[in-house]
Image (cartoon, rainbow, N blue to C red):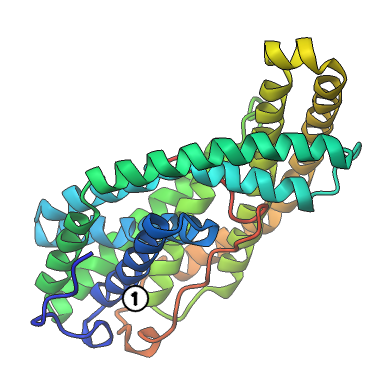
Amino acid sequence: MADAPSGVRAETSRPEPAAFALKQLKRFRQNVETALETGGVDAVHDLRVASRRLNEPLMLMQEVLDDGSSRSARRQLRRLRRAFRRVRDLDVLRASLHEEPIEPRLASHDLTGLVALLDAERDRAIKKAQRKCRRLDHAGADRLVRRQCVKWPDDEDAQSQFRARLVELWTRRIEALQQLDPRRQGMSDLHPARIAVKKLRYCTELLDRVAPPADDILMRELTTMQSLLGHWNDLVAAARRIARVAARRTHLAARPGWSARLMEHATARVRAADEDRRRIADGWPALDAAIANALREHANPPIATAAASAEAPPADEATSPSAASSGDGA
């Protein structure tokens, strides 16, 4: 990817939210390059996280500046993120097979056969993702984001507009999440709640940066709930994929015992996901309380400068399979 133009000021000297966006862009660019070169697990994960963290600042900067380039940048970033989605799904599954104590555990020889199939699938998926990434012009997405950040004015009026719009977005994200309370009747699929928690977490993270002080309690509860929902999602996704492997006609015909044991293991993951559902319901009141407290604090948002938190990095996305859930949802 092309180097930054010489006329662009250092990221630390840019006003918020441009400094935040440039920091995430740097992380995205570095990991795209690594993913194209090596296809590494961490690079695939990190480029996807960085691309998500760019969504809110770009969307709101676009509204303040009335500039359509952010929309194009966000569209490109979303396509690039989705290009690696299947690879990430397989990475999470492969890691969980070795780390998750799901009973009945697969015997070593059964596990070896399954991992070999998944590794071959992952090799095909990363090559396809790399080809798609090159076609999508990742360097062009980089230029679009930089252009928007360079245009961002260093004045209090723009900062005030950004903060006001961010609080509005943050409030809408809370309202959307409250409609997906897993304790409500009929909320059987927790995937929409997982996506809503993730979006609210990223929005809160940005709000803490541009309108300090940070709300540590809400961030802690969102991070905990994202981990729980991510683990539930990973168990369900793993059960589906393992069951599909077991149900292939060639495996049922040639390796019926192996297929049966895979089915048993997939069933065990479904039961574990149901246990996760109860943990999520039990943990929801703490998240509710943290949200209610944060809403009270932001009822009359103060006019504050982000200088005090300009150097504070966002909390890193957890990289364990249970916390950094595979699916993208956006």
The residue under label 1 is 210
Where residue 290 appears, x then y in whole percent?
60, 63
Q: Nearer the viewer, residue 285 or 260?
A: 260
Residue 281 in view here: yes
**Up-down: is 261 above or below 27?**
above
94 vs 310, left or right, is right
Q: Quadrant of the C terminus?
A: top left
Q: Quadrant of the N terminus?
A: bottom left
* Residue drawn at the location 56% of the way across and 42% of the way down: 89
* Residue drawn at the location 50% of the way across and 56% of the way down: 45
* Residue drawn at the location 77% of the way across and 50% of the way down: 98
* Residue drawn at the location 69% of the way across and 58% of the way down: 286
Q: Amino acid at mark 1?
A: Val
207 vs 135, left or right, is right
168 vs 39, left or right, is left
144 vs 245, left or right, is left
Corner quadrant of residue 303: bottom left
**Up-down: is 161 above or below 284?**
below
Corner quadrant of residue 243: top right
Identify the secondary structure beneath mark 1: helix
Where residue 215 appears, x then y in whole percent?
52, 73
* Residue reaching furthest to the front: 254
